[in-house]
Every structure is written in C-alpha cells, then in structure tokens.
Image (tube, rainbow, N blue to C red):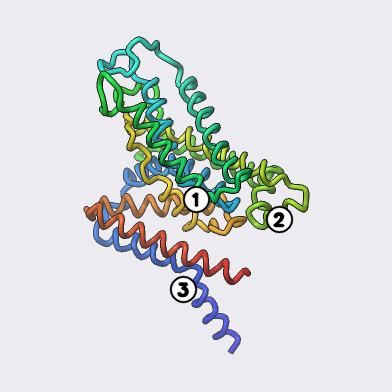
Amino acid sequence: MKSKSSISDLIRKLFTEKIIYVVLLVLIVVIICIEPRFLSVSNFSNILAQSSTRIIIALGAGMVLLVRGCDLSTGRMIGLAAVISASMLQDVGYAYRMYPHLKELPIIVPLLLVIALCALLGMISGICVAQLKVPAIIATLAMQLVLYGASSIYFDREPYGAQPIGGITPRLTKLCTGGVKFGSFRLPYLTIIAIAAIVFVWILWNKTKFGKYIYAVGGNPEAAQVSGVNVKKVLIETYSLAAVMYAIAAVLEVGRIGSASNTTGNGYEMDAIASCVVGGVSMSGGVGSVGGIVIGVLIFTVINYGLSFIGVNMYWQYIVKGLIILLAVIVDMRKYAKRK
C-alpha cells in the first residue's frame, strides 16, 4: 500500500512540478525522430556556440530574478552595447566604417567602455527599483524603450544610415567563431568563455557574502533588512552586475554574428527569463541555481535549433516558445503556492 502511494506521489510530482521537462523531452524526441541527423557532432558544436552567449545573458537575468526582479531591458541593453562596440571594432580596411579615422583599438577598450556604460544603466534601473520603489517590470520596461531609442539614434546616422555595422575585425570574429578541435568535435572558444562565466557566477552566488545576500533579499527582503542586510545596496549592485553580463555577451554576439544593428538583442530578455524559469529559478525570488540556468538555456537552444533544423515555420516557433514560457511560469507559481 505504501509502495503504491509513493509511486502515485512520484507520478503526481512528475506531472505537476516536472511537467515542463516532460514536454521539452517529448519535443526533443519528436525532432530527433523527424530528422535523425540532428544528433550529429557538428550540430552539437553549433548548439554549444549558440548557447554560450545566451548562458551569460541568462546568468545576468537570473541574478535579477533571484532578488524578485524582472529585467525587460536586457535585449535592448545588449543592442546598445552591440552597436557601440561594433562601431569601434570595424576592420581598418573596411570601406563603410562608422569612424573612418579611428585607429585600430584593442578589443578590451570597447569592451570596458560598454561594460562601464551598461553598469551605469543597470545602476539607474536598480536605483529606480530600490530607492524610488518603482516596480521592476515598469522601471526596466521604461529603460527598454529609452535604450532602443538611444541605440537607433546611434545606429541610424550619416553617411550610411540604417545599414548594419559590418566589417568587424577578424581578431574578434575568429575568437567568437573559432574553437579547439578534439577529433571530429570542435569546442567553441565561446563555450570556454561561457564556462569561465559559469564558474565566476557559481562562486559569487555560493561562496561570497554578496551571493548569500542575493538569496536572502529574494527569499524575504523584510527579514534580510532586519538581519542587517542593506537591501537597497544589494538590489542596485545586482542590477548593475547583471548589466555587466549583458555587455560582455553583447560584444561576443557581435563577433559571433559579424555585425550589429539596432535590432540586435531583440527578444533576448524573454529567452533569458524563460530559460531561467525552465531551469528552476523562481519568479517569486530566492530560489535558483547556476546549474539549473545552464540546463534551461541548453534545453531552449536545442528546441530553437531543432525546430529550425526540421524546417518549422518561425511563426510556429514563437507559439511553441510562448507556450513553454507560460507552462514554466504556471509550474513555478504552483510550487511557490505549495511552499507558502
């Protein structure tokens, strides 16, 4: 009797808390059945390359979710950082340079510039949320619009107008499209960078006071305040650090794609948030892990890449992604209701 009860409890848990993984697994199996070539080594390498920048972005977005926030400005911040860094990293021999008289710069210079800019913008969002008590969704939505306008103004300038910023220096494109060969498998350099980011964030969240404060603020901000945690400071620093992650990912995306425009990063915030929720980060704050986020990104990338691989119409892909996001949030809210 006890055995039957435990089995039924396990099945119930599977179809309530783990249903999202069941659905995603079924989708992956369907894709493989339709096109077995999807399991090739080259596809695995491509999936890793596409996942790498998304992992860095999701780690930033996950940090905000942990403190009960929601950053809708992620994609547009990436777009602004992308057009600025791309304009400064065009090859000196490229005919349509935005700054024709600019000397060749080390990659680190534009990178540090956009990191500083994004950190400032993230700090502004954090101040709006922490000091001015603006709901995170409103503060970051407003920031999203401002950033899109700013990136469009910067991008759509004379003499070339709204033309994609191309001709990116091979020093960056080779880094972002190359890899280390292991027989027939190629490990992308981007994946190595992503692994470094994963290790950094894992240490930050699990081995530092700041990481403990993030979980404390997300779990119960009132209790954290009473315990001596400066909640406002933690919120501002969290939004700023998340923005730094977006800036790094933006420069890597420029190198991976080989160009940038004011549409670069469009919708990335939804993919990042969805990956985090699928990976177990609670929208209610205080719950989530680095490993879960990485798994969430990989699952979403496999689904996106797989649907494109078998030729599913882009519009249907949006529907599938939207339903996955909705299902993930429903499951998360049910788990949160049980904890309460």
Q: Identify the secondary structure beneath mark 1.
A: helix
Which residue is painted at 26% across and 25% down in the image? 161
Q: Earlier in the sequence, mark 2 or mark 3?
A: 3
Asked if residue 141 is positioned above or below residue 87 in the image, the reply reads below
Where does residue 110 sit, x and y in percent of width and height? 46, 22
Q: Front-most of 265 and 211?
A: 265
Residue found at the far right of this picture: 227
Q: Within 10 angstroms of label 2, few (less than 14), some, or many (20 or more) residues?
A: few
Quarter occupied by residue 320: bottom left
Q: In 3D space, how far apart are the residues under numbered discs 3 and 1 (Cα atoms)?
A: 30 Å
Q: Within 10 angstroms of label 3, few (less than 14), some, or many (20 or more) residues?
A: some
Which residue is painted at 46% across and 54% down in the image? 296
Q: Quadrant of the C terminus?
A: bottom right
Q: Residue 137: which disc?
A: 1
Q: Front-most of 297 and 1?
A: 297
Say which residue label 2 marks.
Answer: 222
Q: In 3D space, how far apart are the residues under numbered discs 1 and 2 (Cα atoms)?
A: 20 Å
- Would you say residue 13 is visible in this rendering? yes
- Amino acid type at image mark 3: Phe
Say which residue label 3 marks.
Answer: 15
Q: Front-most of 5 and 214?
A: 214
Quarter occupied by residue 79: top left
Q: Within 10 angstroms of label 1, few (less than 14), some, or many (20 or more) residues?
A: some
Residue found at the far front of this picture: 132
Q: Quadrant of the N terminus?
A: bottom right
Q: Nearer the viewer, mark 2 or mark 3?
A: 2
Where does residue 61 sit, x and y in percent of width and height? 51, 46
- Amino acid type at image mark 2: Glu
